[in-house]
Image (cartoon, grey):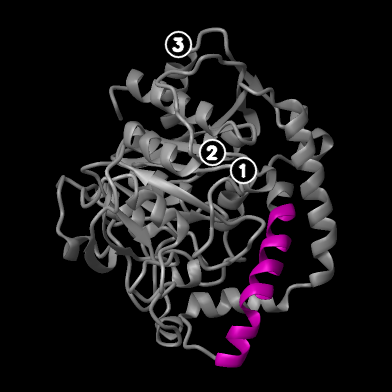
Amino acid sequence: MTGTKTTYTVEESNAFMETFTIEPTASGPLDGLTFAVKDLIDVAGHVTSWGSPSWRDAHTKASVNAVCVEQILAAGATCVGKTATDEFTFGLTGENHFFGTPLNPKAPDRAPGGSSSGSASAVACGLVDFAIGSDTGGSVRVPASNCGVYGWRPTHGLISVAGVNVFAPTYDTIGILARDAEVLSKTAEVLISCDIPTVPDEIGTIHLIKEAFELADENVRQAMAAPVNMIKELFSGKTRETSLREIDGDYGAVGLQRWYECYYPVQWGEIWSCLGSWITDNKPELGPRTKMNFELTKGMDRKTINAAARQRETLFRRVSGVLGPFDLLCFPTSPVLAPIKNSLSLDRTKGDYYPRTLAMTSISGITRTPQVTMPLAEVDGTPIGLSLLAKCHMDAFLLAMARAISAKSGGK
């Protein structure tokens, strides 16, 4: 089942926790644009619910806006509400036990993806021009891919997270979801305080990561053929098929599996360090999936964190050493299409959706690098994104590449 409508009401989308209007504080490059804010990010005068009724009821209204919200308001955009998220942002499906599931308008029977589910839905439903999300393990990139919009995770630490609830701080970033590459770039310019060229001044090598394409389902690989060929034509002589083992050495002998095994011990350890005391002391009501997720983080062997952190640093240095300043990695944003709603086990350790998807999204998290997902492909009407990943702090170059590819694809 695929979506046929092009515009939706707020009620139809189920994308918003609440709607309101906050006028811009100044005129700027975002004049006339509207945006929404994921509900783990503070907006003055509103309670940050974090997808949890218990968290909402235990906290007061924010006294000031998060810094990223201030930046956007000062650039001329109008804020129209706060968007839904997975409970405590602990999920990749966008299905919230208490507040329901935002609409994936391109594929209404499928999950929008999380945890920036409402942000992706609001953009895809045509209710805002762009939305602020957060991305720790794929929470901007996966819903952007699922809903057929652009999504950008920046270099870690490049955008202020002041006024944003802390989840796993060495992975947490603020990201943007947008209807097109132009709006994405204009918003990014505000948040990273630099200009983004319309076309890149220089291009190195675009590495098509062999193991990432192999990890993807057959229908995803087939859908990727056309946009990959377009990139080959657009940047003739610049693309090459590259094995992960050329980048990470023998670590890539089993594909991306060990990247996931490196990623999750640090993330889970940080999640329980940040939230464990509050969960233990307040005993909040939790949805079944979230309850199981917290039990996993609480029960993990914390002695594994040190080895995973050391391996993460090794991978970071290897990728930093291999990638030139104008090189890119190219791979599917997700190895699978958006899952049918309510089809996944409550236990993320059962089935392969989480290990496979997080193996793909962990590349950016582990290497602290920026990644952009572009809505360049579909399978029977269901969107699937193609991603580019650049060297740390090469965000402007990365977004210029997205602009150039978008122009070639007819503004998809």
Reading the image, the residue beneath label 3 is: 233
Which of the 4 image quarters holds residue 268?
bottom right
Residue 269 in the image: x percent, y percent? 71, 68
Q: Is residue 92 above or below residue 371?
A: below
Label 1 sits on what residue type? Ser
Count residues near mark 3 (Cα–Cα under 10 Å), then give few for <14, some for 14-19, many for 20+: few
Q: Is residue 310 above or below residue 52?
A: above
Q: Which residues are magenta?
A: 261-282
Q: CA distance from mark 2 to mark 1?
A: 7 Å
Label 3 sits on what residue type? Glu
Label 2 sits on what residue type? Gln
Left/right of residue 398 with respect to residue 44 in the rendered view: right
Residue situated in front as seen by the camera: 175 or 388 = 175
Residue 11 visible in the displayed image:
yes
Q: Residue at x 64, y 36 (%)?
A: 392
Count residues near mark 1 (Cα–Cα under 10 Å), then give few for <14, some for 14-19, many for 20+: many
Q: Is residue 157 magenta?
A: no
Which of the 4 image quarters holds residue 186?
top left
Reading the image, the residue beneath label 1 is: 364
- Sequence order check, earlier mark of 2 and 1: 1
Please report contact status of discs 2 and 1: CB closer than 8 Å, yes or no.
Answer: yes
SS label for mark 2: strand
- Sequence order check, earlier mark of 3 and 2: 3
Left/right of residue 279 with respect to residue 285 in the rendered view: right
Reading the image, the residue beneath label 2 is: 371
